Amino acid sequence: MKSKYINIILFFICITGIGLVNLFTEDRLISEYENRALEQFPEFSVQVLFSGDYFKKIDLYFSDQFLWRDSFVRISSGVKELKGLPGSDGATIIVQGGFNDAEEHDSLPDINEWGEKVAPEPDSRPEEVIPEPSAEPELTPDLEAYGNEKPEITPGPTNDPVMESTPEPAEKPTEKPEPTPIPASEKDDNGRRIGRILIYNNSAMQLFKANSDAEAHYANTLNSFKERAADQIKVYSLLAPTSAEFIDNDKYKSLTDSQKDAITRVNDKLNGVIPVDAYTKLKEHKGEYIYFRTDHHWTALGAYYAYTAFADSAGFDAVSLDRYETENIENYLGSMYDMTSSSTLRKNPDTITVYKPFVKSEYNVWYEGPVKLKVIDMYHATQKNKYRVFISGDRPLGIIKTEVSNGKKILIIKDSYGNAMVPFLLPHYEEIYVVDPRQYGKNIFNLIQDNEIQEVLFLNYALIVGDNSFADLIIKVMNQ
Amino acid sequence: MVFSSLIFLYLFLPLNLLLYFLCKNLNYRNVILVLFSLAFYAWGEPVWVILLIFSAAFDYVHGLIIERNRENWKAKAALVSSMVLNLTLLGFFKYSNFLTQNINVLFGTNIPSNDFHLPIGISFYTFQTISYVVDVYRNETKAQTSFMKFLLFVSLFHQLVAGPIVRYNDIAREIDDRHITIPEMYSGINRFVSGLGKKVLLANTAGEIAQPFLNGDLQQLSTAGAWIGIILYSFQIYFDFSGYSDMAIGMGKMIGFHYKENFNYPYVSKTVTEFWRRWHISLGSFFRDYVYIPLGGNRSHHIRNLIIVWFLTGLWHGASWNFVIWGMFYGIIIILEKKLLSKLLRKIPAFISHIYLLLVVMVAWVFFYFTDIRKAIGYIGVMFGIGGNGFYSIQDSMTILNNGVFFIIAALGCTPVIPVLNNWIRSRMKNWKYRELVFDICHPAVNVILILLCTAFLVGRTYNPFLYFRF
């Protein structure tokens, strides 16, 4: 009979003990592991209480701040890996919610990557921006940490010398594509997008689901951009296929729709926009290390081949890779590892090779004012998200002025795939403008007019034509 | 609040049990339970907790009126008044939008919908109070004179939001007189933890794996994939629901309440009739005692009675036609079994009748899952090779390979293999003096591992890496 107490005592120790320690553990502001701000204890108001949100927020707070959160997450993903049968070739499909996009996380708190509270009001932030963030990296404003800021938060044109006193562009009467909602079925219970990842051959690949409506929407958006831009402006579209496109196994290849076909369908619909054929170049080199295995991006080598395709389209000679000095960054575990926590990936980290620009340049990122950064920012080599070494990560607007005085100016509207390719363009342009439509809060045509930009390159990975959201962001920067 | 949340497990429950054990007086203990129950309910329904209290007060008064006016027209009037109010509340919150939508479609009218959401657990607690008033009227139980105790019966958080539907009769005595004993507490803990494991480790995982099959594009779905999807959903719904009942029964036992079993390995049944004696038992017996038998049971209008019961069973599960179809589908099969198939089903080999039962149940779950009836029919079509994308796809075999161990554990979990094994080991060690000690050490070890694993899974479920990823 006495031994019956063991069960009872252990049960109570377990729930009360963990409960108590948890209660007295200090809250964290951010999770390095998850790369996001953690939920804080909600502020009370009668309204929030009656809407039911107050307790929901406490639930979120409780789980976000739970004791040994990161270890518990690791345990759960470790145990989940045990549910497969032995003897298979190790190929796994992981279905994951969490492919974040612009619509989500708009309520992320105003905390930057290092857990500092940053004021959300545009006027109070410029002081925090230090001109040389690489020297004092802790203060680099990094929007990725608080992500998809609402456009209202970014400062108005008056704060910004580049944008100063720009008149509204006379709108040409064109058909404006309207933002479209994403079908509900793509979201999981938590409202996160569902994505499928194949892990095969030590490499994780995002699987692609073609969507002809979204392809048309993207092509129409670019066409309408071309129509509304001044006639002499050349507009290019480069859609980069991702690693899933080059799976060397027919069985697994059948899991993902053809990106080549999707790119072709988009290109066929383009009107006045010049398609850049990166696909063929990448395919020629598919045996090389052109994609990361633990990250959804291409490597700088992959970006280089796409750059040679762009050189062909834009009519300049690509610089040979031999001209570049390289440096390697070892032990990179990228986004795919974060998504899957796969032990296969953990055992096979990536190496990032950077090609150091030989052209002198000055690179400014614009928030409220300019922040001087580096085109290859080795500060990030020591951080978690090492892919940010390329132009220091995603920024609303980056302006690179080079020593090349040929008068050529290009605007690149890009997702993070663009980051690795931009450094290769330095020898060819006097000014390079890099806009990330997820963050950019102003009108894109104003930027083009004010700076007399002659070329625009849309540079994104092919998976953006799987749904409407990226095209909708381009519409946003065209109309706002 | 839900049982399978960190805040319940590590704040609400320990606090509740601690305060409960610190008080020795049963009245105080009842007050603590009521306060915790109201807090539990208000956590999810900060507004409609008022409705719960109102509903309880109303039926409490009606119970008293009936008790004091036995053999008198007032008792009947009170019964009718209570039924009308209970069903009106349920109808208003649960079915009014469904009704207006159908009227609008039928008559082309444009009656606006209200935008109240369904108060959590209203279907469960309304049935509990109905059963109480009817039982008092039938003189099967005495009316509760203390409102606090009655509120305890209605709001007790163990079974408030997801059943089992506990009848007042079953716990009337224990409200006034219950005891904590060590063996009961011991087995209550085991029961609670196994329920938690069923919900968090099995149901949630099955749900995650099933997602791409159930929510994907039907044109892309293969026949094998459709079966994988619905098998996983069958796992999910069973482990989810029975896990909840286990947790409720376990928590009841810890403090001296005995709720009736709600599930008895339904998937091992051989006929649909048997399945419904093993699935959600408290609901089936509610309809039996308060609808089917009063209508005349199998003595008069047998088929009509069955149709009414199964129509209501379907409708109770949700205000949507697919649930009605789901209920009626069972009703028709049960009528067939009773009138035509009973001899045949007794003659054929057991494994064939098992397969028959599982087929019926899985087809029925399709109607339960898809609120869109066209989608349900399309899905069933794919299951039987009509439409869809071929017989089999690479994703199907990868799902099985990647989750093979899970499939085996889940399938075994649907059968009584663990209790059978438990008893077998016990009988093998019959004459060994350390037998009980071995169990008393193994159970807590398993429990602690399960709790920690469930915690990891619950935390893991909220793992939400911000990847800025989509593009």
Image (cartoon, rainbow, N blue to C red):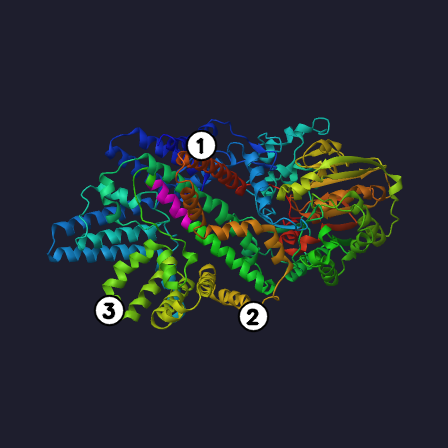
A114 or A74: nearer the viewer = A74
Q: Which mark is residue B386?
A: 2
Q: Residue at x 48, y 54 (%)?
A: B235
Chain at tag 2: B
If the image is split into quadrants, where does the N terminus of chain A sit? top left
- Residue A380 in the magenta stretch? The answer is no
Pointer 2 with pointer 1, Cβ within 8 A: no
Does residue B310 lie above or below A118 as drawn?
below
Image disc number at residue B299: 3
Question: Where in the figure is residue B162, as x and y percent of width and height?
Answer: 37, 49
Cα–Cα span, label 2 and label 3: 42 Å
User: Which chain does tag 3 point to?
Assistant: B
**Circle 2 crowding by C-alpha within 10 Å: few under 14, some 14–19, many from 20:** some
Do labels 2 and 3 touch, CB within 8 Å?
no
Name the spot of residue A422 as percent of width and height, x first. Answer: 78, 43
Q: Which residue is mark 1?
A: A14
Looking at the image, residue B248 sits to the left or right of residue B418; the answer is left
| Residue B249 shown in magenta | yes
SS for dot 3: loop
Q: Amino acid at mark 2?
A: Ile
- What is the CA distance from the residue labelled 1 to the residue labelled 3? 55 Å
The span picked out in magenta is B242-252
